[in-house]
Amino acid sequence: MNSYNPKIHHRRSIRLKGYDYSQAGLYFITICVQDRKHLFGKIKNGAMIMNDAGRMVTKWYFELENKFPDKKCHEMVVMPNHFHCIIETVITVGADLRVCPDTGPDNNTAGIRGVLGEQRGPGECGEPTNQILGEPTNQILGEPGEHRGPGES
């Protein structure tokens, strides 16, 4: 396989123009290994035989739901040099878990602290953070951002 040459390969996006990929729905995703190397296993007698790397992909794919509560992992298939999966982005409804009760001097709940846009200081609600409340927590599929490896948080 030759290296990518923009003068002859003319790659273009297959994304639907004007479509908002942050909206709820099912998304079919394919992720390929660099240089198409067979890192996840091999095909033997018509069946995929996964190695440790292939099993790792399967394990961590289904852990995405625990890291991103607005994602639901559906079917997935691992092949020697790529895998296919269907991920659903769901609309999450409910209170922002970063909002905490504001207790008065007698420990009765006097109200809710954490109005949208209010900054929280270290130690409030047991979390050492300076995040601005109300910021979106949903991760858009394909959105550039901080990427962490398995087991990192």
Image: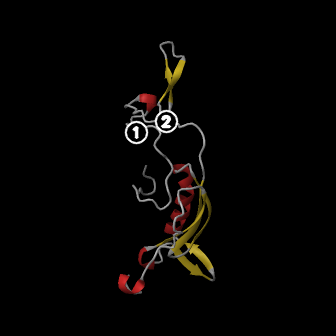
Check residue 98 in the rendering and tell me which mark sits there, or answer none.
2
Helix or strand or loop: what does disc 2 sit on?
A: loop
Q: x%, y% of residue 2? A: 39, 87
Which residue is at 56% across, 52% downward?
65
Q: Report the amino acid beneath label 2.
A: Arg
Q: Is residue 87 above or below residue 92?
A: below
Whether residue 5 is visible here, answered yes or no, is no
* Residue 21 or residue 78, whichever sits in front: 21
The N terminus: image quadrant: bottom left
Q: Report the amino acid beneath label 1.
A: Gln
Image quadrant assignment for residue 11: bottom left
Quick check: marks 2 and 1 in contact, CB under 8 Å?
yes
* Residue 9 or residue 42, whichever sits in front: 9
Check residue 29 in the rendering and tell me which mark sits there, or answer none.
none
Residue under circle 1?
131
Q: Is residue 129 above or below residue 109?
A: below
* Residue 25 or residue 88, whichever sits in front: 25
